[in-house]
Amino acid sequence: MTQPLWETTYADLEAKSFGEASREILDLIPELPHRAKVLDLGCGDGRNAIPLARAGYNVTALDISEAGIRKLNILAKREGLAIDTGVTDMTTCDFPEEYDLIISHGCLHLVERNQWDRMIAQFKTHTTPSGFNVLTVFTDTIPIPHDLAPLCIGLFHEGELYERYSGWETILRKSYTFQDEHAGGIQHTHAANKLVVKNCRTR
Ligand SMILES: C[S@@+](CC[C@H](N)C(=O)[O-])C[C@H]1O[C@@H](n2cnc3c(N)ncnc32)[C@H](O)[C@@H]1O
């Protein structure tokens, strides 16, 4: 299979792979405790990890892409930011600690659905009381673009993500379609579910 299209922009230090930081993540910054711990899984080249590190949080950023992590490390170093990074498969990694915010943006549909229960259970277990999870996934509401079909092996059904967080406080829940333009002018339309939830657990 050819390499994922984002590998092209991960290899280019000046390219923006997925645009600006996610609005719903920036909006959480005032809600997080001082020196909050953040875990960004499938962080790519750091469009969310870098602004969170700039805001003073302790960010751990993991991705399976060596090029993505290499670029993130260089961009962070340019700004003098300390981000704990690693080339890691999120389907098999264990988390050593609890986080105030766990992010999985644009990644869960890239793994088989039989992995989700274990992964989401881990997200929940490793979120601090009153901590947040932020997830964005592609859904099968519209057909996945032909060239992405081999990658998007775990499309969610509409609403399925929301059901998995019943019992958590919903901060934002959004079902939408959007257009994405990638390097080389490749255009895609996607359907997505976005969820920002807060852990109601107390110690
Ligand atoms: C669409 S990109 C999103 C990147 C980033 N979250 C963002 O929003 O800018 C999906 C990312 O998931 C990563 N990824 C895919 N499968 C993975 C896995 N099993 N473990 C860790 N990262 C993975 C890819 O390498 C890629 O960087």
Image: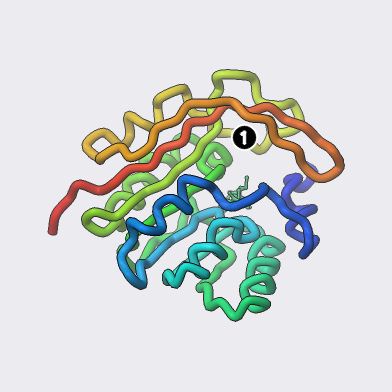
How many numbered tags mark residues here? Answer: 1
Q: Outermost residue toward the right?
A: 184
Q: Outermost residue toward the top?
A: 142
Q: Residue 145 vs residue 113: left or right? A: right
Identify the residue at horizontal 55%, vertical 32% (top origin): 138
**Label 1: element kind:** loop
Q: Residue 98 vs residue 7: left or right? A: left
Q: Amino acid at mark 1?
A: Cys
Where does the image place residue 172, in percent across and percent down from the top left?
A: 38, 37
Where does the image place residue 28, in percent across and percent down from the top left?
A: 40, 53
Identify the residue at horizontal 58%, vertical 52% (top origin): 21
Q: Outermost residue toward the left?
A: 203
Ligand 1 lies under 8 Å from the Cβ of mark 1: no
Identify the residue at horizontal 66%, vertical 25% (top origin): 144
Above/below status of 126 relative to 177 = below
Q: Quadrant of residue 118?
A: top left
Above/below status of 112 relative to 99 = above
Please name whichever residue, 203 or 113, is drawn nearer the observer in this view of the structure.
203
- The image's colouring method is rainbow
Q: Quadrant of the C terminus?
A: bottom left
Q: Quadrant of residue 1?
A: top right
Where does the image place residue 181, in percent across and percent down from the top left?
A: 75, 38
Q: Outermost residue toward the bottom?
A: 80
Other-residue count near label 1 (Cα within 10 Å), few / some / many at <14 / 14–19 / ≥20? many
Where does the image place residue 190, in percent across and percent down from the top left?
A: 63, 28
Q: Kindly identify which residue carries mark 1.
A: 152
Identify the residue at horizontal 46%, vertical 22% (top origin): 158
